[in-house]
Image (spheres, rainbow, N blue to C red):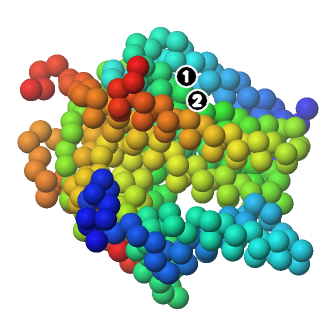
Amino acid sequence: MINILGSLFILVGALFCFLGALGLMRMPDVYNRIQTGTKAVTLGVLFTLLGVGFLHPDWWAKLIAIGGFLLMTNPVGSSVIARALYKAGVQPWRAEGDR
Amino acid sequence: MTLAQGIQFLALFVFAAATLLGLLRFLLGPATPDRLVATDTLTVVATSILVFMAAFLDSALYLDVALVYGVLAFVGVIALARIIETGHK
Amino acid sequence: MSNATPKAAGHIDRHPSTESGLTLLVMVAIVWLLLTGSLAIQELVAGVLVTLAVTLIAYPRSGILGGVRWSFALPWYILVYLWVFTLALFKSNFDVARRVLTPSLPIRPGIVQVRTNLTSALGRMLLANSITLTPGTLTIDVENDLLTIHWIDCPPDIDLDTATAAIATDFEVALRRFVR
């Protein structure tokens, strides 16, 4: 039972990763790609970690270490890329008819 | 094959699809920043896959691999972003 | 203080102090415990040695960790913050899912600025991180007390105070209880 629950969490995590990658493909400009990429994939990793925690409860300490590290660094990485683009003068995409 | 294993195989395919989409964005570009964003996303997906593989192959060693991979990928992304910011092509 | 770090973003004191060193020590100790995942006596002895060594080596760079408000309720405040954060992360992901899966791609991106009351580098970093992971917003830059934010669904002609209330206030309230 607990194995099925853990596997389901992993599957949900994989689906969020897929969603992030899909957003990467669909979004019209680089800022929006960063947005969908970071958010969905971060939650995807967290769900995967949770699922693996269910499958192997004795690994919890290292899983928390990985999760905490990703939560701290992943947004920083995205912000640094966005900042570099902004400083380099890349303007955000605007919808047609919106100014 | 138990139901849990079936779900895990399904997850494996979804992860593969996510990686493929990320790779497609990496190949299509159109500019360096897009590729960098794709790289960033791909590394996190890869970390996720490594953690999953630890459970799938029942070996805690992959967790250490995932952690070190995550650290190195983060440093790499920061370094590349710095290069874009200061304008070295 | 500000003239010692002329290139630092904002008027933030980044000099190491006893307090920032303490934060570093606690963080290194927690990381060691999580990585070894055991309370065996030989692991703990090695952990004390490694923690002290790492803290001593990294102390000169620990200035950015300054600004934690130490109290006995600190773990509780961090948990409350994590709860607020997790809720926002879930909301943001359903938001992203809706936008990505809708065929017409309903986005209206724009760039806004937000003002923060947090004064420490650690606090601003945590705020910027939280904003990046919450619905439709991405921190682009932090300069002094102004955060530049890319908003995926930006209302037209929004001013600084409205944007601050919409984006940053929730997190600031949770963050200000344990970090300056």
Question: In screen coordinates, is C135 left or right of C10?
Answer: right
Identity of the residue drawn at 40% across and 13% down: B30
Identity of the residue drawn at 35% across and 32% down: B86
Marks counted in the figure total 2
Q: Position of residue C39 (x, y in %)?
A: 83, 75
- What's the amino acid at mark 2? Leu
Element on which disc 2 rests: helix
Identify the chain of the residue marked 2, using the numbered disc in the image. Answer: B
The residue pinned by badge 2 equals B42
Please say if the residues under marks 1 and 2 sit with CB atoms less than 8 Å apart.
yes
- Disc 1 to disc 2, C-alpha distance: 6 Å
Residue C161, relative to residue B88: is it above or below? below
Q: Position of residue C36 (x, y in %)?
A: 80, 63
Question: In screen coordinates, is C168 left or right of B73?
Answer: left
Seen from the viewer's position, the closer of residues B61 and A51 is B61
Seen from the viewer's position, the closer of residues C80 and C29 is C29
The residue pinned by badge 1 equals B22
**Residue C47: quarter of image:** bottom right
Seen from the viewer's position, the closer of residues A80 and B27 is A80
**Residue A31: quarter of image:** top left
Element on which disc 1 rests: helix
Question: In screen coordinates, is A21 left or right of A56?
Answer: left
Q: Residues within 10 Å of mark 1 (few under 14, many from 20)?
A: many
Residue C169 marker: none
Q: Position of residue A35 (x, y in %)?
A: 40, 36
